[in-house]
Image: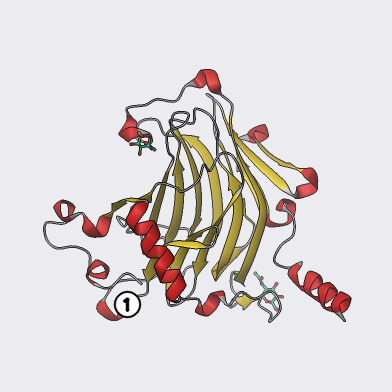
Amino acid sequence: MLLLSVFVMSSFMGSFAGTFYEHFDITWGDHRAKILDKGNLLTLTLDQVSGSGFQSKREYLFGRMDMQIKLVSGNSAGTVTAYYLSSEGPNHDEIDFEFLGNLSGEPYIVHTNVYTQGKGNREQQFHLWFDPTKDFHTYSIVWNPQRIIFLIDDIPIRVFNNEESIGVPFPKRQPMKLYSSLWNADQWATRGGLVKTDWSKAPFTASYRHFNAEACFWSRGNSSSCVSDSVSNSGWHTLRLDASGRRRLRWVQKYYMIYNYCTDFERFPQGRPRECRRHVY
Ligand SMILES: *[C@@H]1O[C@H](CO)[C@@H](O)[C@H](O)[C@H]1NC(C)=O
Ligand SMILES: *[C@@H]1O[C@H](CO)[C@@H](O)[C@H](O)[C@H]1NC(C)=O
């Protein structure tokens, strides 16, 4: 019985997990992006000539994406590793993680943003409670019709609720692909651009493994097909924070949040964005 259920689960999961070959296309950087270990590992590199990147073959309209990432180690100042969902076109939607490198031993910044219909300006930034360059850690985006939750190792760091009822657009009509790239942004990334990329340390490398998507897949011209099943489904389509999730979010916000657009009163002299006037979760 146990064997049987394990088998059923793994055959079902095949449509979600699978290799990097099945899920992604390398889109720039030529040999700088590599799929290794029979499709179980992907590495991006950056050198003085170019960065590199990949994108999902599929488009998603809601889902939960988990990826284990090990960020550029050592002196990563000036480098940015971006990991995000985005739709196409001028009024695009986007859900962003960006990891801003730093000098050896100095903390990375995790930068997050949410764009709806082409408009972002919703940055929140964090330091981390671990060294993201020593090991792989899981970075997740849960995107359902009610909210977007950013998680790191299953700890919620940010929630963006659907506040359409008070006139805040929410991404829910445009399918998105998943993208990741490693590039040079030393004009702004590290200490606001003061610290430049040290090219003598190049190439810089970020590694990816254990991608998992539980999602509604979109195919153009057809309605989306939502692949979910009771065995592997984590309940992403109705996921919300429970008491322990809220406690963890408050812990992250208290000790690790370094910037929140919602409390940047100087930036919004006309009044903060509407969603900021609501409770955050
Ligand atoms: C880099 O280190 C400095 C000094 O500790 C810190 O203020 C900054 O937030 C760190 N991160 C980035 C990306 O600049
Ligand atoms: C849409 O669905 C039809 C019928 O199921 C299928 O033949 C066609 O290939 C699909 N189109 C796309 C773009 O996926």
- In the displayed structure, would residue 247 be above or below residue 8? above
- In the displayed structure, would residue 46 be above or below residue 120? above
Instruction: Pick the residue in front: 248 or 149.
Output: 248
Q: Residue at x 27, y 69 (%)?
A: 275
Residue at the far top in the pictured view? 200
Q: Is residue 42 left or right of residue 110?
A: right
Residue 172: quadrant of the picture: bottom left
Residue 34: % across, % down = 69, 39
Q: Is residue 233 left or right of residue 50?
A: right
Q: Visible in this render: residue 256?
A: yes
Residue 48: % across, % down = 52, 24
Q: Residue at x 20, y 54 (%)?
A: 264
Quadrant of image for the C terminus: bottom left
- In the displayed structure, would residue 251 be above or below residue 106? below
The kind of residue tagged 1 is: Glu
Q: Is residue 241 left or right of residue 58?
A: left
Instruction: Pick the residue in front: 106 or 119.
Output: 106
Q: Residue at x 64, y 57 (%)?
A: 57
Instruction: Pick the residue in front: 108 or 165.
Output: 108
Q: Visible in this render: residue 218?
A: no
Q: Secondary structure at mark 1?
A: helix
Ligand 2's quadrant = bottom right
Residue 273: % across, % down = 22, 64
Quadrant of image for the N terminus: bottom right
Residue 5: % across, % down = 82, 78
Tag 1: Cα neighbours inside 10 Å, few (<14), some, or many (≥20)?
few
- Kindly identify which residue carries mark 1: 164
Q: Check the image and tell me how it is coloured.
A: secondary structure
